[in-house]
Image (spheres, rainbow, N blue to C red):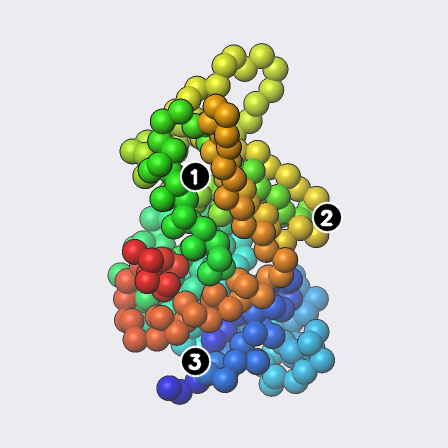
Amino acid sequence: MSSMKIAVAGASGRMGKMLIETIVAADDAQLAGALDIPQSAFLGIDAGLALGKTTGIQIESDLAKGLADAEFLIDFTRPEGTLEHLKYCAEHGIKMIIGTTGFDDAGKAAIAEAAKKTAIMFSPNMSVGVNVTMKLLEMAAKSFSHGYDIEIIEAHHRHKIDAPSGTALKMGEVIADTLGRDLKEVGVFSREGVTGERDPSSIGFATVRGGDIVGDHTVLFAGIGERVEITHKSSSRVTYAHGSLRAARFLADKQTGLFDMYDVLGLN
């Protein structure tokens, strides 16, 4: 198998640096491009500088330059940036691995439309462990469908800009779909004051932001006399980077189509 030529968006960010480090260390991948915003102080600098390595790839804001040699783009940035990258990749047949969260319905629709032109793997969380956890939640929801209150608690670092996290929302969607409910109707995202008794059909969310927490997610199934907690904790962003490379390998023989990590891991 020839080396996958992969570009990274948000190259100077925490996740971007981790992705670059993982790609450079992989036997079957090579760094083919590095993108950042036009205001970045890192433009023109070697993408491996923060790692103490020379990659020969400069960080660019111009998509034509940054993606000239790329077959794949891994994007963990922000919705507005990802959607701009999406247009370019769709027109030029560059496959995308999208880990960005916070898309509205229009953004998700744009991703689905672009997948008619190129292959896209879109998931709010690339961690293998998180996606296995999602499968466990399906099993649990079937057994705890009556008499159990469902709450989702998530914690992330102080710099995260969206809440609840995309992973927490996906967990809620997985549970709601399994129970035949619509998360938009049963999701409770804030509680304050005299709220009244809990609606037994609701799925509650609680958000914690602080310090350098990479990502903790717990789903609580609380019944009378017992409670079950299913938890996943990330201690390093490397899990997301490794999952992204698995996604690229999965897309290698795909020309078009929209996929998720369940497809990558054979969990569907």
Q: Which quarter of the rendering shows the N terminus?
A: bottom left
Examine the rendering and report whether any part of residue 171 can be seen. Answer: yes
Question: What is the CA distance from the residue labelled 2 to the residue labelled 3?
Answer: 35 Å
Q: Which quarter of the rendering shows the C terminus?
A: bottom left
- Reading the image, the residue beneath label 1 is 172
- Mark 3, other Cα within 10 Å: few <14 / some 14–19 / many ≥20: many
Q: Residue at x 56, y 74 (%)?
A: 22
Expressed as whole percent of the image width and height from the top left, the position of residue 219 reads: 50, 39
Q: What type is the residue that disc 2 sits on? A: Gly
- Mark 2, other Cα within 10 Å: few <14 / some 14–19 / many ≥20: few
Instruction: Using the image as rendered, state which of residue 237 and residue 97 is in the foreground.
Output: 237
Instruction: Using the image as rendered, state which of residue 142 and residue 119 is in the foreground.
Output: 142
SS for dot 2: loop
Question: What is the CA distance from the residue labelled 2 to the residue labelled 1?
Answer: 25 Å
Which is more N-terminal, label 3 or label 2? 3
Q: What type is the residue that disc 1 sits on? A: Gly
- Mark 1, other Cα within 10 Å: few <14 / some 14–19 / many ≥20: many
Q: In this rendering, would 54 be left or right of 188?
A: right
Examine the rendering and report whether any part of residue 92 can be seen. Answer: no
- Reading the image, the residue beneath label 2 is 211
Q: What type is the residue that disc 3 sits on? A: Met
Q: Residue at x 29, y 33 (%)?
A: 180
Snapshot quadrant of residue 145: top left
SS for dot 1: helix
Q: In this rendering, would 252 be left or right of 220?
A: left
- Reading the image, the residue beneath label 3 is 4
